[in-house]
Image (cartoon, rainbow, N blue to C red):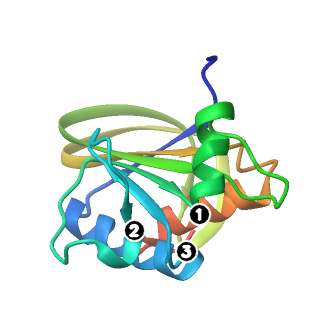
Amino acid sequence: MEITGYDNVIFTDCKKRFVSNNILTWIKTLWPNCLCQFDGQDNHILLPDLPKQLSWFEGYFCKNDTMEVHWEENGYSLMKDGEGPFGILFRERNMLHLKLNGVTEVNDPIVEPNYSANLLLNNSLEMTVITPCDPHKDSFSELVLENCISACNYES
């Protein structure tokens, strides 16, 4: 099968447990009976049955059995209802050096395109959100990404 999905990478200084709990809370509102798969396990868990203190680094989410079959046959792609499976992967990072071009503050949407900067982060969390499509071109993918950003307790 060809590689599908669109990788969206977020770096944050938030703790993984905080972010992952916020994401699961949001998913419960999106798909109350979501099928979840964590850390390469073969079995799926219904969202209502998750342990309260679950710690995970890889999570994959499908609305129901129909979407799971669609995912197995088509990868990360939208279904006819405009929704699709998505994944979230966490990676704890020690020291990062990011080179930025164009800087935007969360509470000040003015972009300074000629402004470049170097960002050094120590002990940060990298979150890769795999959406069915480019969030700039698809409303469901945008919804997933925006809620993952909001899970870091930042406004986008």
> Does label 2 or label 3 sit earlier along the sequence?
2
Percent of width and height locating residue 4: 64, 29
In screen coordinates, is 133 left or right of 81? left
Up/down of 32 relative to 62, above or below: below
Within the image, what quadrant is residue 56 found in?
bottom left
> Does label 2 or label 1 sit earlier along the sequence?
2
Return the residue nearer the eye: 119 or 135: 135
Judged from the image, the secondary structure of the residue bearing numbered disc 2 is strand
Judged from the image, the secondary structure of the residue bearing numbered disc 3 is loop
* Mark 3 nearby-residue class (10 Å; few <14, some 14–19, many ≥20): few
Q: Residue furthest top?
A: 2
Residue 46 marker: 2
Percent of width and height locating residue 109: 65, 66
* Mark 2 nearby-residue class (10 Å; few <14, some 14–19, many ≥20): some
Residue tagged 1: 63
Residue 107 marker: 3
Percent of width and height locating residue 36: 40, 58
Return the residue nearer the eye: 48 or 15: 48
Up/down of 109 relative to 39, above or below: below
Q: What residue is at 39 percent from the left and 68 percent from the top?
A: 46
In screen coordinates, is 71 left or right of 45? right
**What's the distance in space between the residues labelled 2 and 1, CA to CA?**
10 Å
Q: What residue is at 67 percent from the left and 52 percent from the top?
A: 84
Q: Quadrant of the C terminus?
A: bottom right
Q: What residue is at 78 percent from the left and 60 percent from the top?
A: 139
Q: Amino acid at mark 1?
A: Lys
**What's the distance in space between the residues labelled 2 and 3, CA to CA?**
36 Å
Q: Is residue 114 visible?
A: no
**What's the distance in space between the residues labelled 1 and 3, CA to CA?**
33 Å
Judged from the image, the secondary structure of the residue bearing numbered disc 1 is loop
